[in-house]
Image (cartoon, helix red, strand yellow):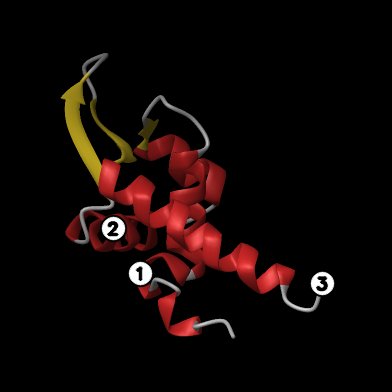
Amino acid sequence: MIDFSQLDKIIHEKGRLSIMTLLASRVEPWAFQDLKAQLDMSDGNLITHLRTLEKAEFIGGEKFTGDGRPQTLYQLTPAGRKAFVAYLGILEEILNVGK
């Protein structure tokens, strides 16, 4: 029997799952504006989800001034990658039920 309570509620929300998936998809960090464009989210919505993930220590953001404009780059933390892999493992169990 699958223990659905093991699904991480922080990751499971659609917006945060999308962010985690993008951040896990490559080694290089994602700029805020690139995440916003890729996910088609408003600034406020994206910032809220990023803050939730940062508070859980699943992602980290690094602020810098590249070409004169301030930017923030985001990437998964080791704890975030571990939580995401565990989350995907539970989803895989769900998919395999009845096989």
Q: Position of residue 93 (x, y in %)?
A: 62, 68
Give the residue displayed 30% in from the left and 56% down from the top. 47
Distance, label 1 to label 3, CA atoms, is 29 Å
Q: Residue at x 17, y 32 (%)?
A: 63
Real-space CA distance between mark 1 and mark 2, rounded to the nearest whole angstrom: 7 Å
Which numbered marker is on residue 53? 2
For label 3, the crowd category at 10 Å Cα-Cα, with few meaning under 14, some 14 to 19 and many 20 or more, is few
The residue lying toward the viewer, choosing from 90 and 16, is 90
Residue farthest right in this picture = 99
Instruction: Classify residue 2 as left or right of residue 87.
Output: right
Relative placement, left or right, of 82 versus 20 is left
- Quarter the N terminus occupies: bottom right
Q: Which mark is residue 10?
A: 1
Residue type at numbered disc 3: Lys
| Secondary-structure class at tag 2 | helix
Please tell me whether mark 1 or mark 3 is closer to you in this view: 3
Mark 1 vs 2: CB contact within 8 A: yes
